[in-house]
């Protein structure tokens, strides 16, 4: 009966076993145990490996798990495996055991935990853990340093000065290969200083080609997928208006109008938030249709609300908040007359929202059951009313029940990102509240200079 190898090619020790069998011409059947589908937890697989981990083998009636033990067994049980893989010489064999034992708690522990907590966790439905990643990075770098300075010391191409690879080279290199999944910056920081390690990876890959690359294909594919995802991610660059950063010559290169937001996508620059959101919708695949529907009529209605927004809701809200609270923070005095004008515009805009665009059954503007870019833009505008004192905010918003519900619905549909992005506003709200209560306290204290 053929040897059965139970493996998932996403697993480093599984890949080491598969490469070993292929390089040594061992006749085997690969049985995929898909970890992402939790097949390792099935009763069938549990009968093979009660620890429910891959890799595992069944050779006739003999079952075995733990990749290092499997490599030793295969090297001993199958004729035709060259001696360099697992030398008969007692002391060389013992040194190989020594590296393999060390590997579990060091290189493997560091590499697996680092990749899990910087890249893989979200794909497995787990949260990324920055603290675990930092810990793992220390173990990983210290392990690579040991490999470089202890086992790759000397002129040999492989561990322990070997001229040809052993099972220890294969196991450790397969472990390191998962670093391919990291972003370029992390990978360079971690592997860059270890020149001998880099050379050794190349030598091991070359010695086991084409099987090495074939078995690692799954990793290269995932790497491409992840780097496409990374290149779709936006870097947010802070332009601090309170420090006048928007007036700097660097930022003028990005947006000659000296306003935020602005984007740079490759060699393309764009300003004006509505134009930016419309562009992002078309330039990035995978954005759900409800944000900016492809239906020409729904799209036109969304454009119509967003055009109206500039001179109405935005105009009213921004001028009201600047002239009642925010002005001094950006070097502008409060202007009660401008505030009164703005308040009229704001009230009239809120009435229009309530009676025209939120009129009907839908939770969002224009009767939508899911938010569009118009909902997002306008709710974000209204959020700045948070910095008003609570009585004033409630005076302005509470007559508009549908508007209040719509703000909550848009927040819920975009959380946790909505809250994360508005944290700065909540902090400012607290600061202004404290300021107000300090002013209130001093104004109620009896004056010591009173002439009573
Ligand atoms: N020390 C074991 C490690 C095996 C192991 O951790 N396998 C992982 C895949 S890389 C696994 O099966 N994980 C499934 C789980 O833990 O639920 C070996 O070298 O074979």
Image (cartoon, rainbow, N blue to C red):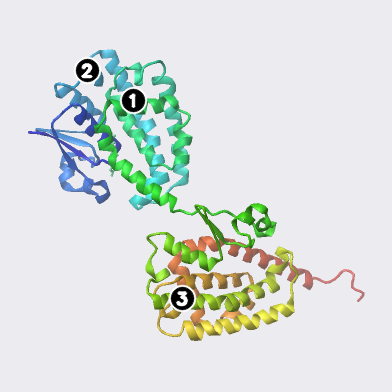
Q: Earlier in the sequence, mark 1 or mark 2?
A: 2
Instruction: State yes or no: Cβ of the residue under disc 2 lies below 8 Å from any atom of ligand 1.
Output: no
Q: Quadrant of the C terminus?
A: bottom right
Any mark on residue 302, and which?
Answer: 3
Any mark on residue 311, and which?
Answer: none
Q: Nearer the viewer, residue 224 or 332?
A: 224
Q: Residue furthest right?
A: 451
Any mark on residue 203, and which?
Answer: 1
Rendered image quadrant of residue 90: top left
* Vertical side of 298 occupied by 11: above or below: above
Is residue 220 at least partly visible in the picture? yes
**Ligand 1 falls in which quarter?**
top left
CA gap, disc 3 to disc 2?
Answer: 72 Å
Q: Residue furthest front?
A: 267
* Vertical side of 258 occupied by 4: above or below: above
Query: Which residue is found at the position 27% from the left and 17% from the top?
Result: 93
Q: State if disc 2 and disc 1 touch (CB < 8 Å).
A: no
Q: Is residue 22 left or right of residue 307?
A: left
Query: Which residue is found at the position 66% from the left and 79% from the top?
Result: 342
Query: Which residue is found at the position 47% from the left and 82% from the top?
Result: 357
Q: Is residue 4 left or right of residue 128?
A: left
User: Badge 2, how many Cα within 10 Å: few under 14, some, many 20+?
Assistant: some
Q: Earlier in the sequence, mark 3 or mark 2?
A: 2
Q: Earlier in the sequence, mark 3 or mark 1?
A: 1
User: Badge 1, how many Cα within 10 Å: few under 14, some, many 20+?
Assistant: some
Question: Mark 2 sits on what residue?
Answer: 83
Q: Is residue 79 left or right of residue 272?
A: left
- Residue 424 location (% of width, % of height): 59, 61
Q: State if disc 2 and disc 3 touch (CB < 8 Å).
A: no
Q: Residue furthest left?
A: 1
- Residue 20 location (% of width, % of height): 22, 29
């Amino acid at each position: 009966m053929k040897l059965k190898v139970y493996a998932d090619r996403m697993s480093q020790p599984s890949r080491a076993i598969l490469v070993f069998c292929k390089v040594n011409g061992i006749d085997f059947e690969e049985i995929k145990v898909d970890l992402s589908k939790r097949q390792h937890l099935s009763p069938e697989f549990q009968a093979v490996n009660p620890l429910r981990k891959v890799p595992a083998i069944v050779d006739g009636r003999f079952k075995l798990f733990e990749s290092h033990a499997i490599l030793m067994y295969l090297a001993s049980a199958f004729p035709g495996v060259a001696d360099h893989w697992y030398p008969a010489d007692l002391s060389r064999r013992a040194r190989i055991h020594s590296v393999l034992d060390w590997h579990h708690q060091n290189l493997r522990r560091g590499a697996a935990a680092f990749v899990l907590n910087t890249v893989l966790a979200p794909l497995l439905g787990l949260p990324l853990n920055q603290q675990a990643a930092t810990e793992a990075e220390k173990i990983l770098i210290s392990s690579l340093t040991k490999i470089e300075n202890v086992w790759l010391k000397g002129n040999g191409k492989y561990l322990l000065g070997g001229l040809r690879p052993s099972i220890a080279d294969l196991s450790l290199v397969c472990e390191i290969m998962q670093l391919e999944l990291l972003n370029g910056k992390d990978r360079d920081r971690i592997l860059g200083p270890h020149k001998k390690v880099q050379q050794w990876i190349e030598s091991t890959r070359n010695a086991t080609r084409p099987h090495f690359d074939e078995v690692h294909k799954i990793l290269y594919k995932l790497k491409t997928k992840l780097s496409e995802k990374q290149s779709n991610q936006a870097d947010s660059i802070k332009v601090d208006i309170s420090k006048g950063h928007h007036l700097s010559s660097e930022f003028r290169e990005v947006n000659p109008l000296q306003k935020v937001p602005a984007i740079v996508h490759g060699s393309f620059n764009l300003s004006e938030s509505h134009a930016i959101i419309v562009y992002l919708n078309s330039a990035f695949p995978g954005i759900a249709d409800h944000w900016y529907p492809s239906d020409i009529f729904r799209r036109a209605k969304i454009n119509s609300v967003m055009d109206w927004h500039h001179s109405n809701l935005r105009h009213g809200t921004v001028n009201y908040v600047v002239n009642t609270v925010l002005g001094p923070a950006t070097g502008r005095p409060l202007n009660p007359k401008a505030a009164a004008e703005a308040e009229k515009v704001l009230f009239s805009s809120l009435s229009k929202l309530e009676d025209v665009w939120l009129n009907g059954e839908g939770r969002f503007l224009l009767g939508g059951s899911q938010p569009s870019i118009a909902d997002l833009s306008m709710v974000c505008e209204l959020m700045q009313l948070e910095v008003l004192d609570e009585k004033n905010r409630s005076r302005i918003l509470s007559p508009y029940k549908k508007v209040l519900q719509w703000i909550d619905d848009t927040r819920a549909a975009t959380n946790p990102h909505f809250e994360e992005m508005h944290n700065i506003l909540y902090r400012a709200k607290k600061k202004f509240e404290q300021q107000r209560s300090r002013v209130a306290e001093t104004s109620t204290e009896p004056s010591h200079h009173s002439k009573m």
